[in-house]
Image: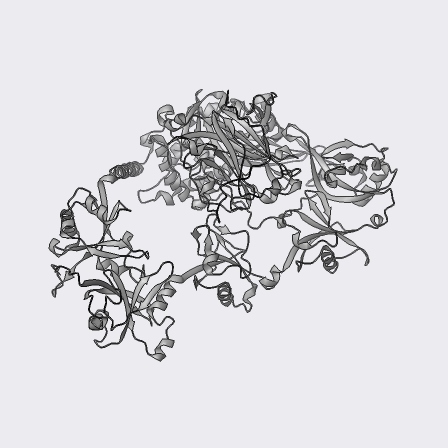
Amino acid sequence: MTLMTPPPMEPEDDEMLVPHSDFPVEGPQPMEVAPAEATSTGDVQAADDPPSARFTWTIENFSRLNVKKLYSEVFYVGGYKWRVLIFPKGNNVDHLSMYLDVADSTTLPYGWSRYAQFSLAVANQIHGKYTVRKDTQHQFNARESDWGFTSFMPLSELYDPSRGYLVNDTCIVEADVAVRRVSEYLSHDSKKETGYVGLKNQGATCYMNSLLQTLYHIPYFRKAVYHMPTTENDMPSGSIPLALQSLFYKLQYSDTSVATKELTKSFGWDTYDSFMQHDVQELNRVLCEKLEDKMKGTVVEGTIQQLFEGHHMNYIECINVDFKSTRKESFYDLQLDVKGCKDVYASFDKYVEVERLEGDNKYHAEQYGLQDARKGTLFIDFPPVLQLQLKRFEYDFIRDTMVKINDRYEFPLQLDLDRENGKYLSPEADRSVRNLYTLHSVLVHSGGVHGGHYYAYIRPTLSDQWLKFDDERVTKEDMKRALEEQYGGEEELPQANPGFNNTPFKFTKYSNAYMLVYIRESDKEKIICNVDEKDIAEHLRIRLKKEREEKEQKRKEKAEAHLYTIIKVARDEDLTKQIGKEIYFDLVDHDKVRCFRIQKQLPFNLFKEEVAKEFGIPVQCQRFWLWAKRQNHTYRPNRPLTPHEEGQSVGQLREVSNKANNAELKLFLEVEMGLDLRPIPLPDKSKEEILLFFKLYDPFKEELRYVGRLFVKGSGKPIEVLGKLNDMAGFAPDEEIELFEEIKFEPTVMCEHIDKKANFRASQLEDGDIICFQKSLLGQNVDQCRYPDVPSFLEYVHNRQVVRFRSLEKPKEDEFSLELSKQNNYDEVVESVARHLNLDDPSKIRLTSHNCYSQQPKPQPIKYRGVDHLTDMLIHYNQSSDILYYEVLDIPLPELQGLKTLKVAFHHATKDEVVIHTIRLPKQSTVGDVINDLKTKVELSHPNAELRLLEVFYHKIYKIFPLHEKIENINDQYWTLRAEEIPEEEKNLGPHDRLIHVYHFMKDASQNQVQVQNFGEPFFLVIHEGETLADVKLRIQKKLQVPDEEFSKWKFAFLSLGRPEYLQDTDIVSLRFQRRDVYGAWEQYLGLEHSDNAPKRSYAAYQNRHAHEKPVKIYN
């Protein structure tokens, strides 16, 4: 998924692929980078260099690295030098940043480029399946010589030793790189090679592209979309049917790849939605529901159901009495299990598997009470187009996270759902329908759970020729690539260093099928039908033909742009219209004046005739002035064109005017009106004359407007033209007025009083200068005005900032707006908010800045007086926002910042309940203080009970906090703090008694290896010398209050570093717990193996603020 350098994302957002250098880096970046203590399997021999290989980089002393960025040593793949670049503390984000870099980019010849597909990974050294891996592809060149992931993985996960990414302070980074020929990639013409075109990727929309191609290549569906009623007045960006018709038409008739922006706009998506990677299945469902809704009441009503809808029957049948309950349900797609199933048939077997309801789980049948029963699902009918969603993503309750299942899973070219005498069919199914299906498309997901790339293998006509649709690129592929290579599982990969280790390296394939589309053989002719021009509404054909012509015209204009100059002509009318409304400083916004596109070789005098026609001003009455950018960043008319210049061509003149911006020529047209209000010829301008522009300020109305221009003599004085100025303003001839010169406004406003008695030259006035004037205010009038003079008004306008405030609880909704000044300090901003909310204490307001790219609040709030001015609150990287989020706290923010807030889960000694308490104490407090505070809030089993505080993470106890430990450094964001009473037996330990960890576990056989997964609440247990397992079991059963029947199924094991050794009742338990050389006591424990029947308790309260994934929504 190649992204076009999108904006930097904050850690809570989905990652973006970017060249690392495109990020603003505060402070200088070190040019020299300290070499890592690294061992690597990369070799510096390019001989027999494979086109794809894996490089492994072992980085020791990782947490002690004191550099901003770090390069691996160089390795060779495909005859090229590569290296991995990491930012150990993040590239201005709180994630690890990691990129693949062309090692010799600075010495390569001009115009070099190379194309590679690659994945980067941080290995999990405890559980391989939790390795974080992300893949992408990129065409590397001098401008983008590195590419990768700025938000690769959260630093909080990486640096947490219990997570398994840092073991003995060593981090293992892997890079799988496959080099492809650039020429092959760039020169590929999809239409010419395959007859089909691809779809452009808007950011992270490859998931949508693969689905749209699949739907487009179901001709019956495409035909129905074409037949949806739309009119010439509809706009594609506001109508899903029209946008889809337009997209399908372009896919059918265009020669180059097609953009999807109109379609995503019709969904109501903003740019950020396009940069969020969503779920194909979710999008498919939502899009089909939308279309089904839009098709109602039209000629194509019911098409979605006819194509995709099937029905199954859920039943419960009693075994000992004659009672059966059934419920018919419809489906548009089927979700099939991947885990534990070797192929599609095994998943269907599992789908219709009969579950027995017996024992504690009996079925309550009407009239018959609790009964043993069979429960299952059978299919009444299958649809013509069968969409199978493979459950590659699963929620892992133990880890409280989503994981991707990369197991091998086969799917056939022909799928027979009537097999074994119709074992999947219900009794009422129509057996005359032959449910034999042929594979039409395979949607593939490549990557991990946090992102990746989607593409599709499709055979549009169901011939033997498969095509791969990968965003813009369409290629012919063989059947093996489309089927077997998408089964998943493991693959052997050649080592980057052939001499180093000759054993083949097996690695999990992260590319595998995620959705399958089958078409029923008996419906093939109907579904794969002919779709041609006559299926497309005439207004659509006309519209799209016009669009094509406009596109061609734009292309032509672009190609001929070097032959033309754009001339922008500003006039008095533009100044009058804009000043005081759209602009306040300088004279005009040149983007809003009349533009002329003129051939460069046209003589300027002929251009004047064009102007005469446009504005009705005779050629002899026109005088043009060139604009100039001054050193103080203002832009003013500088001098009139000379007769010699007017005799030149437009192109020559443009070069005279502005060497920096060659495409445009900006002019001011001076016109003088006679008494009859008609233009008159202009006299020549003498050197003594100065052209000044005048703005009038009304302090009572707080209005500024343009009133005209005058020529004055340099030796003259302002006092001599006061009558004319009063006339311009509509004042009495003898009105007292004050004059100010508007000098500049960036970065600060400079506007100075003019001495009416000093001459213009002495006041350093020149052509193009601006004078602002106003009535002189008398003493009492000054108090009535917020901004009594021009400088104070311009200062106000320059710093004026309307801020939209949103409650942090509802971060999508503007609640109120306040007009503030950019110069307001922290106190002034919170006082304004408090005033609006009628809150007496402004220090209870806490503000959070806005992330311009994710359109969400930043994860950290603004500290009390943590910024100087409002501008600092609104800036995000180089972008400025107008949104702030607020909260009203229950105590003042300075006080809260001096406190540490901890969430502590209190486990009652005798009741089976957990209550979460929020403890707020000064940061200097100790764990002992937390326990004392907690004692006042909880119910103890007896008044003298002692408490302890534990750190629990993924169902293991990692630490008992010493009472003297300071709470300032305790982090409850990622793990649970648990408080409990200390049992009496632990207080009186004998010399040979041991306190051991006891955890619940079950075995998970995914990923072709057995993993131990802990669950439930861990606890400590005292074991006595010589005590057998049978004795210990009795105490555990009593402690946990487990019924005999269930307890008899439990197994007991000694576990060290995740490996179980099962114990017999006669084993002496204490003998197992003699070793002391284990990394972390939590890795050596007594394990209770049984199934997890407890209701899941969510610890979502401890997760990051705003770390929510957006669901797919189509708004229109």
Who is closer to the viewer here, 946 or 399?
A: 946
Question: Quarter of the image holding residue 266?
Answer: top left
Residue 465: % across, % down: 43, 21
Residue 945: % across, % down: 80, 55
Question: Can residue 441 be seen here?
Answer: no
Report whether 931 appears left or right of 331: right
Question: Can residue 717 be seen here?
Answer: yes
Who is closer to the viewer here, 941 or 19?
A: 19
**Above or below for 991 versus 442:** below
Colour scheme: one colour
User: Image point 59% across, 23% down: which residue?
Assistant: 500
Who is closer to the viewer here, 1097 or 866?
A: 866
Q: What is the total number of numbered labels drawn onto the structure image? A: 0
**Above or below for 174 versus 233:** above
Report whether 798 appears left or right of 705: right
Question: Quarter of the image holding residue 1065?
Answer: top right
Residue 231: % across, % down: 32, 42
Who is closer to the viewer here, 419 or 1053?
A: 1053
**Above or below for 381 versus 13:** above
Residue 1044: % across, % down: 81, 39
